[in-house]
Image (spheres, rainbow, N blue to C red):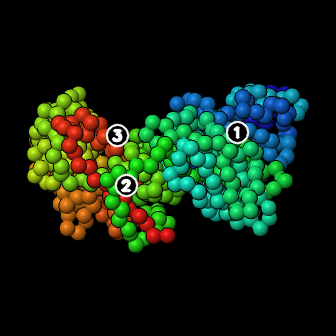
Amino acid sequence: MKRKIKAFIITAFCMFIVFQFKVSADSQIEAPRVNIDTNKEWTVKFNTDLEPSTVNDENITVTDWNNNKVPVAVSMGSNGSTVLISPEVSGYTPGKKYYVTIGQNVESMSGKKLSNPLKMEFTTTNSYSDGTSYSELPNIVSDDFEFTPLLSSEKQGFYIKSDSTSDVQYRIFVNGQYDKADDYTELTDGYTSPDNNGKISSLKTLSGGTNGQKYKLVIYIKRAGVKGAHSDVNTDYDNYTVDYLRCVDSIDNENDEYVNYDVSLNDMVNTQLNSPDKAVFVETDVMNNAASKNLIKYYSNSNNFLDSYGKYQFLKLTYSDGATADSLNNFLLGKGILEGKGQAFLDAAKDNNINVYYLVSHAMLETSNGTSILANGGAKNDDGTYLYGVPVYNFFGINAVDSSSVLSGTKAAYENGWTTPEAAISGGAKWISSNYINGIEAGQDTLYNMRWNPEEPGQHQYATDVSWAFKQISDIIKGIQNMASDNSLNLEFEIPRFKK
């Protein structure tokens, strides 16, 4: 009996990862899988039929890199010896390590159990996904929102198109940025058919949060009257699309100026998507996860950010009075090497016609509040000596390429002679001013224009992170509130508009 059980274990695991190549059972257990799609649905094949009651998410699990259990859907496949492990809602996190474990309590129909749990490691590809694309099943080809941004008093309308010639239905769930990652709210009442105008209407309003709120949507599609071919913990489905919307409490158009650009939003997004400088989305501390098309669309669509908070990425970045060295220093208390540098920032802002609140917030973002390696002497050799023999400073991430940011940023600081913090502030401000904010050719004088350059999309962009401009808003607002010496600031905003 022991021999039979052992054969069952080896065969089960061999079939589990026989998809791409055959190796011995032992090496299969030890060989991690890499570059796995974030929407991967694993198929586990056994050499005998299984007792269905033992095929569940307690006996078959997926855990993440921190050993936390991931909410996946476990179900029987097309026959009694096949198990499907569907990914968590909207897919796994890109560029992360996971483990599939087949527990000992999985039984065959004859009551045999595994003598030991079997584990397989896999690492997802470092790219965000906009959904699944199972062939020969209905798929969503486009989805448009009735309201952009959505007001918290409105119920969103969705205009969805599919590639199916037969009747299909949709089911929509959302996850707010302040919700738990696996906490989704349904906006429909089960699968719903579009109305005569091709619209699916939300049954619920959403919260705008404190300063507007980003929502991730999962829009499921399946054939009407037929159970979906796949499933997750939300529902069964044939395919799904991941998209994003922003909900705010009100629109703020005070001191706004609009500039029309001869490019459509869709063309701009496609240009960004295909640019040699890969657009990334930095959600935590991972710098190289490629942004999906819908993430690019969300952050580049200026209409998403017309509230009193989001519009600060459209703030004109030329110099205006209102700050003093003392007010700047009070704001920079506890900000690492930036502390006490108020006068240096103020002088650099005046000399280079740059908004000082932006300049400080940019430095805080790029240096992790004055604590980064680039802000504290730069790269070092293995023996602890500075790479170029002297400490150098780069407070604005200038020429710090994502794949080698410390080395390339240190090199830029050395070549520019930024051997003191004051020189780095002054020199960095001059570089940003001449190349972006006040440059004759560039003229990119808002955070949005520095990131997206709508005049020439895909060219001369300051950052690759699609959320870069939005991330600086908080510090700019705090800076204006805490660094301004009076309330006479004249703030101007320049909002881009794209052709239809």
Q: Disc 3 residue type?
A: Ser
Task: Give SS at disc 1.
Answer: loop
- At 23% from the left and 28% from the top, the residue drawn is 334
Residue hosting label 3? 474
Name the image quarter holding the N terminus: top right
Q: Residues within 10 Å of mark 3 (few under 14, many from 20)?
A: some
Q: Is residue 465 visible?
A: no
Measure how far apart labels 2 and 3 are at the Cα level. Answer: 19 Å
Q: Residues within 10 Å of mark 2 (few under 14, many from 20)?
A: many
Q: Disc 2 residue type?
A: Thr
Q: Residues within 10 Å of mark 1 (few under 14, many from 20)?
A: some
**Contact, mark 2 vs mark 3 (Cβ under 8 Å):** no
- At 30% from the left and 48% from the top, the residue drawn is 405
Residue 464 shows which numbered tag?
Answer: 2
Residue 233 shows which numbered tag?
Answer: 1
- At 77% from the left and 27% from the top, the residue drawn is 105
Task: Give SS at disc 3.
Answer: helix
Q: How many marks?
A: 3
User: Of marks 2 and 3, which one's residue comes earlier in the chain?
Assistant: 2
Q: Does 147 sit left or right of 202 as displayed? A: left
**Contact, mark 1 vs mark 2 (Cβ under 8 Å):** no
Looking at this view, name the residue that lies furthest to the bottom: 262
What is the x, y in percent for residue 418?
12, 47
User: Of marks 1 and 3, which one's residue comes earlier in the chain?
Assistant: 1
Which residue occupies the foreground of this view, 405 or 420? 420
Measure how far apart labels 1 and 2 are at the Cα level. Answer: 34 Å
